[in-house]
Amino acid sequence: MQVFFGNFLIMAILNILQYPDSRLRIKAKPIELFDKPLKETIADMFETMYASKGIGLAATQVNIHKRLIVLDVSPERDRQLVLLNPTVLKTSEEKKLHDEGCLSVPGFYESVERPDKILVEYFNSDGSKHQLEAGGLLSVCIQHEMDHLNGKVFVDYLSRLKQHRIQKKLIKEKAKLSVIN
């Protein structure tokens, strides 16, 4: 939500759901309206992603169950990419291991194997259809965020033991924070 204070535009920092929150498992629905409220949500998601020092954020992570992803993998943090209703059309046979982290699973990084390159079709915020061939970090980030839209978290690729350890530690950290506050 954007708010004006005089001539200044104030964007909202949205609350990021934390694993193992069950709302992270909800499958996102397609976006049908490419309107002003959607553009405001996109701006809020970028603001939230940058404030959290992330490189990608799926709407599911902020409890908005629409097929919307924002990304910026550039070192300068100046190449915003918005993917609405993204669909992977093609993946490379070659797969690579990449260390992944997640704003919904703070403090944890694990290796996940994914296709090295993808071809994705998506709509931009004006409703125009595009295709993008992505490799490297951008490919990983798109696949990671698309998993969120499908109700999947990167820890799902890990062993049950690692999943349990991460879940236990995050629950313990959350309990500590609630005692402090």
Image (cartoon, rainbow, N blue to C red):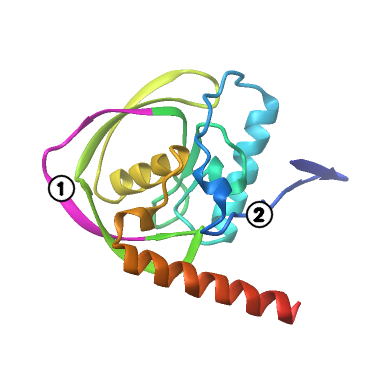
Q: Position of residue 24 (x, y in %)?
A: 53, 48
Position of 137 relative to 128 (above/below)? below
Q: Which residue is mark 2?
A: 15
Residue nearest the observer in this picture, 9 or 62:
62
Local crowd at mark 1 within 10 Å, few (<14), some, or many (≥20)? few
With 73 as the anchor, is 2 left or right in this view?
A: right
Q: Which residue in the rendered view is the most extreme toward the right?
A: 6
Q: Secondary structure at mark 2?
A: loop
Q: Quadrant of the N terminus?
A: top right
Position of 50 relative to 166 (above/below)? above
Majority SS type along the magenta span: strand
- Identify the magenta region: 87-100
Position of 47 relative to 163 (above/below)? above
Q: Is residue 94 magenta?
A: yes
Q: Position of residue 14 (x, y in %)?
A: 67, 51
Earlier-in-chain disc, 2 versus 1: 2
Label ID, residue 14: none
Label ID, residue 95: 1
Local crowd at mark 2 within 10 Å, few (<14), some, or many (≥20)? few
C-alpha gap between disc 2 and disc 1: 33 Å
Residue at position x 71%, y 74% in the image: 178
Residue at position x 34%, y 42% in the image: 143
